[in-house]
Image (spheres, helix red, strand yellow):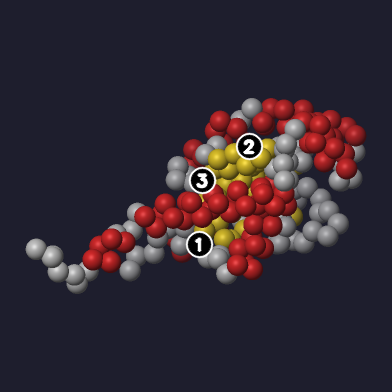
């Protein structure tokens, strides 16, 4: 029996909207509930590793020379400059996952999402929004990972990114974290049901039956 291609879920958001936390909570919930596995796509980045981050789990941390070599070898499905650093998604990993029937979750910025949308027409694109602009400001300043100047740049970029919401298939408002995870899980479930409906399910059920007439 031919394997159904794996689904690709692309989650983007302005910095501080909470997309990383939502994605990780979704994966953890699905593991606990015994749902069909959703695999995390680990991006490559040239930024410095933060406290608690692990190479190969959170990101593949590489230097600029290595990133340049990957671009030259056409190894990225997408890559972009984000807040002074570069980020990219492995093309080979996306293609191998699809061929193996593995559903994949890609957490990305809006630049990368635009690139993936041009290449992967059947992917599901999800945009995460903060409940309000003041909340976004509080989240960025409260996490303590950036200085004042970088926060200012992130807010300026966030304003531009929010205008991109029309490019996405679904919008998740992260006003209540648990409810936002529920919404994200519902999108995944809906896309999986949509794919299942493409299979000849009715034919399987009716196989061997006799017409009542």
Q: Give the residue drawn at x 78%, y 36%.
A: 136
Which residue appears at 64% of the width and 27% of the height? 163
Rounded to the nearest angstrom, the CA distance separating label 3 from label 2 is 14 Å
Give above or below for 200 relative to 157.
below
Q: CA distance from mark 2 to mark 1?
A: 24 Å
Q: Quadrant of residue 135?
A: top right
Question: Which comes before the other along the chain, label 3 or label 1?
Answer: 1
Q: Could you classify mark 1 by the number of other residues whose Cα lies within 10 Å: few (under 14), some (14-19), or many (20 or more)?
A: many
Left or right of 137? Residue 130 is: left
Point out residue 123 in the picture as x, y percentages from the top left corner: 49, 46
Q: Going 51% across and 46% down the picture, which residue do you hit? A: 124
Residue located farthest toward the front when viewing the structure as drawn: 212
Q: Residue furthest left?
A: 213
Q: How many marks?
A: 3
Give the mark nearest the N terminus, 3 or 2.
2
Residue placed under numbered mark 3 in the picture: 124
| Of pointers 2 and 1, the one earlier in the residue sequence | 1
Q: Which mark is residue 110?
A: 2
Q: Residue at x 60, y 67 (%)?
A: 33
Query: Crowdedness of circle 2 by 10 Å Cα count: few (<14), some, many (20+)?
Result: many
- The spot of residue 151 in percent (x, y) is 84, 35
- Describe the element under mark 1 as helix, strand or loop: loop
Is residue 2 visible in the rendered image? The answer is yes
| Whether residue 73 can be seen here | no
Residue 113 screen position, x and y as percent: 58, 40
The residue beneath circle 1 is: 102
């Amino acid at each position: 029996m031919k394997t159904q291609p794996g689904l690709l879920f692309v989650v983007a958001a302005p910095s501080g909207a909470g997309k990383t936390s939502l994605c990780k909570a979704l994966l953890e919930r699905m593991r606990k509930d015994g749902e069909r596995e959703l695999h995390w796509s680990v991006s490559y980045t040239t930024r410095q590793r933060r406290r608690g981050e692990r190479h190969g789990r959170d990101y593949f941390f590489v230097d600029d020379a290595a990133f340049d070599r990957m671009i030259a070898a056409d190894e990225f499905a997408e890559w972009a400059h984000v807040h002074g650093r570069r980020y990219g998604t492995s093309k080979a990993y996306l293609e191998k996952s699809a061929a193996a029937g593995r559903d994949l979750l890609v957490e990305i910025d809006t630049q990368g999402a635009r690139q993936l949308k041009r290449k992967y027409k059947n992917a599901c694109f999800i945009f995460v929004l903060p409940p309000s602009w003041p909340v976004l400001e509080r989240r960025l300043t409260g996490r303590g990972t950036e200085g004042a100047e970088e926060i200012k740049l992130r807010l300026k970029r966030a304003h531009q990114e929010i205008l991109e919401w029309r490019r996405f298939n679904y919008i998740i408002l992260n006003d209540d974290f648990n409810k936002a995870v529920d919404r994200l899980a519902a999108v995944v479930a809906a896309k999986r049901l949509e794919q299942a409906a493409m299979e000849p399910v009715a034919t399987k059920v009716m196989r061997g039956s006799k017409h009542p007439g």
